[in-house]
Image (spheres, rainbow, N blue to C red):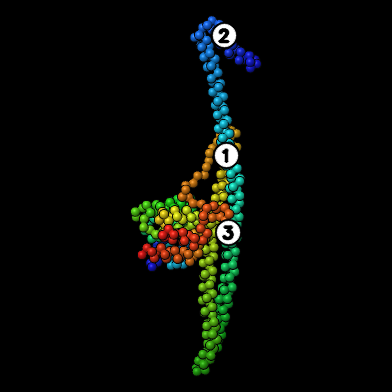
Amino acid sequence: MSKDLKFLVVDDFSTMRRIIKNLLHDLGYSNVTEADDGKTALPMLQAGNFDFLITDWNMPGMPGLDLLKAVRADAKLAKMPVMMLTAEAKREQIIEAAQAGVNGYVIKPFTAETLKEKLDKILGAGK
Amino acid sequence: MSNFSILKSEYGTYVEALSEALARGDEPGFFAAVDHIVHMREPKMFAEIRRLTGDLQKALDRFGIESRLADIAEHEIPNARARLTHVINMTDEAAHRTLDLVERSGPLAERTAREAGALLDALGAFRERAAGSGFEGIARSVEAFLPVVRALEAFLPSARSDSEQIRRNLAEVLLAQGYQDLTGQIIRSVIKLVEELENALGNLTRLSGGLVEHTSLGESPSAGHGPAVPGVTQGEVASAQTDVDALLSGLGM
């Protein structure tokens, strides 16, 4: 599996972005960029060639679900793997995210193992 | 002048005209006088209706604000209290988890440092004893090197396993910091409630001056609800990653 994948981590809390970045680093992914909400993330995604998007749901500005929908609606980004990493855990929300085309859904608080497992699953399935 | 004398002076002429027209059998004159009196009454009547409508509107606004306030007091304040208690529990848990991991890592680092120190001492002793040359010197060196090898053999495996354990503990410390995000989301929702309460109380005060501002903190439906809080969050909530996985695999993912 290629470890030079370019990740974009979107979360409004900088502590959480640091945690995810560190965990990705531990898993061998060192090319990680951060954004603090969907509104900042979308132009970054459109401008840079990211390979993987990890996003929170509940963010001021543009929530993660809207970002996911915008990614899926953009011809250039539509196929990008998207993982939702969020405290939103309502049944209907998980279904909504799945219907919007999310590739993985991890609820906070999470473990390093869960993150690795879901990442591997998504990256394995994309091959 | 009394109220009635004002009325008498305003209406007197027209009432007289009215009764005169009636006595004369003057139909157009009669209706002209009636119309005049009605026209005189109309503005007052409309002003009265306007005032009543205004009062009614104020009462309705007040009722709206008051019922929202009652709702906040009855449901959302207790909810906010539960949310903040949950925040305390989460920060407590995260702090203890971090402290536990720090306490468990300290002795491991100390042991590695202590054993490395012992190894350095053994190496120093070896250097001293190995001084000299010739066969005797070589023989002494081999003999003197044995304790160093033993110390190395004892040190390396434990140094490796201790360092690995410290690394794992550090990764867990890292994850424990996730509480900041989760509690932050909950605190933000309480701040939003306080803001709404402030606005509602402000509106209620302004209402006496007739100024009503309707402020509702409407959110887009896709904004999210924040972390689930035990005893507060309603509806079906996935409590663990396994619930999420089961749900998603049920959807064919």
User: Could you tell me the amino acid type at mark 1?
Assistant: Ile
- Can residue A83 be seen at all in this image of the molecule? no
Task: Report the residue marked by disc 1.
Answer: B65
Give the spatial CA distance, label 2 vs label 1. Answer: 54 Å
Q: Which residue, given by chain and number where applicable, does mark 3 sit on?
A: B90
Quarter of the image for the C terminus of chain B: give it. bottom left
Q: Residue at x 59, y 47 (%)?
A: B75
Residue at coordinates 43% horizontally, 56% vertically from top-left? A98
Q: Earlier in the sequence, mark 3 or mark 2?
A: 2
Q: Which residue does the image show at 51% across and 70% down from the upper left?
A: B167
Q: Amino acid at mark 2?
A: Ser
- Residue displayed at 53% across by 90% down: B143
Image quadrant where residue B65 sits? top right
Between marks 3 and 2, how big is the CA–CA gap?
88 Å
Say which mark, if any, is on residue B19: 2
Q: CA distance from mark 1 to mark 3?
A: 34 Å
